Structures are given as structure tokens and as C-alpha cells.
Image: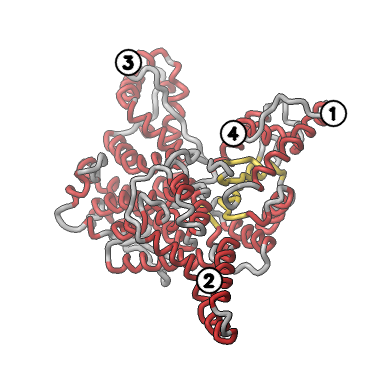
Amino acid sequence: SSSITRELQKIFESKADIIKAELGSALTKIHISFDLWTSPNRLAIMAVFAHFIDKFGNQQSRLLALRRQLGIHSGENLAETLFEIVQLWDIRGQVGTVISDNVTTNDTCLSYFYRQLDPSIRPADIKARRMRCYGHVLNLVARAFLFGKDAESFELDEYFKRIAHEQEDEGYHLCEESTAELEVILNNETRWNSTYMMIERALRKQTDIRAYIFALEGEKDEEKRIPADDILSNEDWRVLGEVNEILTPLYHQTMRTQGWGKGDSHGRLWEVLVGMEYLLEHFEDWKGFYNEFTTETIRATNLNDPELIGRASAPLRGTNIRSACSRRRPARFDGEDVYAKYAALDKPPASKISQKSSLPADHRAYIRASINNGWKKLDEYYSKLGESPLFLAAVILHLRFGISWLEATWATEEQLAWVRDAKAGIKDYFARWYQSNQRTDDLQSKSASSLTNRGKEDDHYTQWINSRTEKAFATSSSVSEMDKYLRLEPQDTQEPIQWWRDHKPSFPVLSSFALDVFAIPAMATDCERQFSLVKLTLTSQRLAMGADTLERVHCLRNWVRHGGVELGSWVGN
């Protein structure tokens, strides 16, 4: 056992040197994602991934650590662990953004972490580098829609636990034909999409479930029957259909953006803002459709705050547009042309697919409240996107979208001010963090040398000219790159990373900024995937495995699987 552990350590250290060299030669900043998890043997584990574009132009994700988190899980303590890992991999000077869940502990963690990297960093600069995991945002929105403030109020899972338990019954199988290969799905309390999948599967097997329940009603043994209170009525089934229609886009967004970022989509940062715009439009469509408000609805709800359910809920607006862009009902939903807006889309408007007219008033009220809850949570995190210019930069620097996409999407007079602020914010960030890099310094020194050579006949006159032109030249090259790019027409490019690599001679500084942005993933799902794999490793026979061994095994597995290293060669002493 000890000899195997020593050999594993040798292999790990040998291959870690290769990964360290890969990180050092990256074309971009090294972006970090992290998350915490409690293992089956009750250890608190922090997973840390590095995300970057390698020297060949490929987007990469490397597991850096599965580190045991000791002590309390305070933000300061998490920051210490994260900083130790960054120091170990010699990437302190390359760290870009950090992607993590939305809990406030992570805000504190990143505040401490970035101050350890750079004591002079400003709070606004820390917020600009704090990337909120899109998957976690979608989870919060869906749970707000499903549960509001009371997760226990959703009892469909109790109903299907009994059905799932009884699927082995011969009578149940006699009811199945077209969906014979499908079983009822139970949800997982920590994953909203499991609730969606449970509802979606129930609707597909609705005929089978109804037939089985009907068959049980003839049982003499009362214990074999399903209690009357647990049987879904026709109205209940229609509510489930309504819930399914509303949640489907969130589920598709989750599945799309948890990918590996291959090609033009699936996990890229630009999909966060674009996806949230899409979902806000979806919720606003349903919100407007359910916005009818009657006294009968209030009486039927039996809620403490019926006004919250019925009103049109204008979004809260931030005092600073650049730090908080809240939505309002778009002009495209006013007037008679709402159907035409959807004519070119596969997704029909709510008014075409909703079953609202067949629902009782109390059911409509709760659907309305759920829509408002989901919309408010989505709008809350939509506003937080303004804390970092990088979400907007990912859209603007994607030539398929560019600034024109924002101008078309934010079309009202107030929203056009957001566009102007978006451009200003990105230019400020670009000037602050990229304009002063070495490549711009090289251009500046060449220009200064040229001006000096031309003015040798009058040194004082030359110095006077240089004093007036030096600052202007230092900013002109970078600013002109940004302005030149913003004047480009959108292009139907499917590979933004390749486009920026091909156009680096035209945009030597801006291309570095763009590549850094496109190396940022939309989610921290790599950590979640890793925890699932670790759980498979820590079976009941391996619960004594040490944290160091666990980390080495899974780091090597990740590096081999994704082409970072190869195994099979001899490791010498």
C-alpha cells in the first residue's frame, strides 16, 4: 500500500510539471473556478479548476486541486486555501477571473483572495473579476419559481415516490404500451432540474399513471389504494403542464451552457447575458399573460399578501445603470404585434400554449405568483451582471453580435443609455488593464524614438513636442483598436477565438483582451462533475482513502482524459 502511494506521488509530481509548463505558456489569463463539497467519508473538499486557452489556441480546463478544507468555511479561510493552490502552481501573476456560486461567503473569499494577489486592488476591480456561476443562477431562478420561500410546499415528489415504488407491480406494467421503456422519475432536493424531469416524465406517462390509479380503486384492501388526497385532479395535471412549459427554457439553458465550450457555444461567457435576455423575455411574456387581476383571484389565494400575486410588479431599478440594469416590460410586448414577434421562432407565445382559461382562480393565482417569483430572482441577477464589464465584453467582442446586438436588444431610450455605459465601461477596463502592457509600451518607445530623431536640430523644441504628444500616443493605439473594432459590421463567425487569433496583427492589444474574455467559462460545472466522479471513487470499501491520494488520482485522471498528459512511460527515481 505504501509503495503504491509512493509511486503514485512520483507519477503525479512528474506529470504536474508538464501541466505547470502548460499553464505558464498559456495565451490567456488563468481563470479559476472552485466549489466546496462534503465527501462520503465526511471530508470537506475544495475542487479548483484552471481555465485558459493554450498556446495552440485550444480552450482547456485542468483540475488543479481536490484540497481538504480545514476549519470553518469562512470567506477568509477559503481564500487562504485558494491562494495556497495558486502559489503551488506558480500562477499568481496570471490569475484572471474566479467563477463560483453566488453565496455571500464567496464574495468575502474573493475579496481576501485578490488582496493577497495585489494589495492595491480596488473593490470595483474585485467585483469585475467575480464571475457568478450561470448554472447556480438558473438553479436559484427555477427554485424561486417552484418553491418561492417554502420548498416544502411542493409535494409532487411524495406522490410519485409511491408510484415509483409500485412500478414493479404487474398491474402497472399492463397499463404501459407506448412508454413501456420509461419509468417515473423521482426528484433530487438539491437539483431543480430533477424536479423538472420528474414533471416532464409524469406528463409523458400521464395515461399510464391514471390507468394504474383507476385500477387500484377496485382493490378491496384499502392500504393498496392511493389516498384520495394524493390523487392529482384534472386541474392539477393542467397546472403541471403549465409549469412544464414555463420551466423548459431554463432546463435547456442549463443543459446548453454546462458544456465544454466547443465551437461557438455551450459554456462560453457570452451566453450568460444573451441567455438571461432570452429567459427574461420568456418570463415577461408569461408574466404579461397572467397579469389579469381580479377580486375573485385574491379571495381564492388565502395568502397573507395577495397584492403581491396580482399586481404587475414593475422591476426595481438601480440608482446606477452601469452597476444595476433592471428590466422593464419591453415595448415589443405592447400592442397587437406580439404574435408576429414570435412568428419566426419555434417557441410560441404563452397565449398560444397556456391552459390558463381552464384553471380555477386559485391555481391561476399560484401560477402567477410563481412566475413573479422566478422573474424577480432572474431580474436580481441580471442586475448584478453590471458589476463586471466582462459579461458585456463577451457579447461585444463576439463578432457575431458586437455592439449592434445590444443596440437592437436594448432599444428603448433608457436602455440605449445602458449601451453607451457598456461601451464606456469596457473601454475603461481595457485602458486600465491592457493599455499599459508591454506590447503598448513597445509601440510607445518606437514612436518616441522616431520623434526624437526628427527633432535633433532643436532639442528644446523636440522636448516640447514630445511632452505634448507622448501621452496622446500612449493612448491612441489601444483606443483606436477598440474604436476600429466597434465600427466593424457583425459577421457570422462560429469561432470567435480563431477569429481573434487570425486578426491579432490588426488588433495586437485588443486581441489579448478578447482571448482572455473568451477563456472564461459560463459555469463552475467542472467542479460539480468532479465531485460526482469522486463519489464513485469513495465507495464503502475506499472510505479510508486519504485526501492527498484522492487528489492525485483525480488530477491524473482529469489530465489524461483531456489530453494534458499521457501515462505509460517509465518514471525514474
Residue 364 image offset from top left, x and y in percent? 27, 47
| Amino acid under disc 1 | Ser
Q: Which mark is residue 177?
A: 3
| Amino acid under disc 3 | Glu
Residue 158 image offset from top left, x and y in percent? 45, 33
Q: Which mark is residue 474?
A: 2
Q: Which mark is residue 2?
A: 1
Q: Secondary structure at mark 3?
A: loop
Q: Residue furthest bottom?
A: 460
Neighbours of disc 1 within 10 Å: few (<14), some (14-19), many (20+): few
Residue 262 position (above or below residue 433): above
For marks 1 and 3 on the same chain, the one whose residue lies earlier in the sequence: 1
| Amino acid under disc 2 | Ala
Asked which quadrant contains residue 257, the reply is: top left
The N terminus appears in which quarter of the rendering? Answer: top right
- Residue displayed at 49% across by 49% down: 518
C-alpha separation, residue under disc 1 versus residue under disc 2: 60 Å
Image-based side of 254 in relation to 516, left or right = left
Residue receiving disc 4: 562
